[in-house]
Image (cartoon, rainbow, N blue to C red):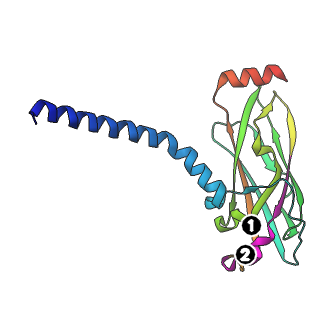
Amino acid sequence: MTPERKNSRVAALVGLVAVGMVGMAYAAVPLYELFCKVTGYGGTTQRAEVASGEVLDRDMKVRFNASVHRDMPWDFKPIQISQEVKVGEQMLAHYEAFNPTDKTIVGTATFNVTPHKAGEYFAKVDCFCFTEQVLKPGERIDMPVVYFIDPLIAEDPNLDEVSEVTLSYTFFVMEDEKAVQETANSR
């Protein structure tokens, strides 16, 4: 094999590796999110259409936490600090957001549950985190969360000592100004 041909093969191989690495970089975030949703890893909660229907005689305390990213000017807080629940019991909690600025702002929330190992068993039936939230200047909104703790938690011996979980949300500004304007104009 001639040196030019060898160099061409090496260049082609390096090019394929580079393209593959870029492709994996783009795929990493969606694949990680999918992994977290399926396994509950990192405190990612599950989504459910309805509560399980089975309520156990096991009490849990659910605490609520709220924060905003440093670029998000909203005031955001839980209405209740905690709730006492039975495992399997469908519950309703409320958060409140207020836009104190003179601009319409679109935000989205991320969430997790601690301890992380309980995230797999914390199921949300309805949540504001599934949609973008639009707040006009001075607007305040109530954002309900319908949730339950899956009775399957009782079958996990690693969670026998867990009697308290915390549901945390963080709001972020949606960066796409075009989406902000389109959403604001359609309201």
Examine the structure image and report whether residue 147 is included in the region drawn in magenta.
Answer: yes
Q: Is disc 2 placed on a helix, strand or loop?
A: loop
Q: Residues within 10 Å of mark 1 (few under 14, many from 20)?
A: many
User: Which x, y percent locates residue 184?
Assistant: 79, 23
Amino acid carrying label 2: it is Val
State the CA–CA distance, disc 1 to disc 2: 8 Å
Identify the residue at image location x=12%, y=30%.
4
Q: Position of residue 114 (x, y in %)?
A: 68, 64
Query: x, y (%) of residue 153?
Result: 75, 72
Residue 151 among magenta residues: yes
* Residue at (79, 31) in percent of width and height: 134
In the rendered image of this protein, does residue 32 appear above or below residue 105?
below
Q: Which residue is mark 1?
A: 165
When the figure is inspected, residue 51 is found, relative to residue 106, above or below; the finding is below
Residue appearing at x 59%, y 55% in the figure: 35
Give the label on residue 27, or none.
none
Left or right of 4 in this view: 139:
right
Q: Which residues are magenta?
A: 144-158
**Residue at image x 72%, y 75%?**
162
Q: Are marks 1 and 2 in contact (CB under 8 Å)?
A: yes
Q: Crowdedness of circle 2 by 10 Å Cα count: few (<14), some, many (20+)?
A: few
| Residue receiving disc 2 | 162
138 and 124: which is toward the camera: 124
Image vertical order of residue 170 relative to residue 23, above or below: below
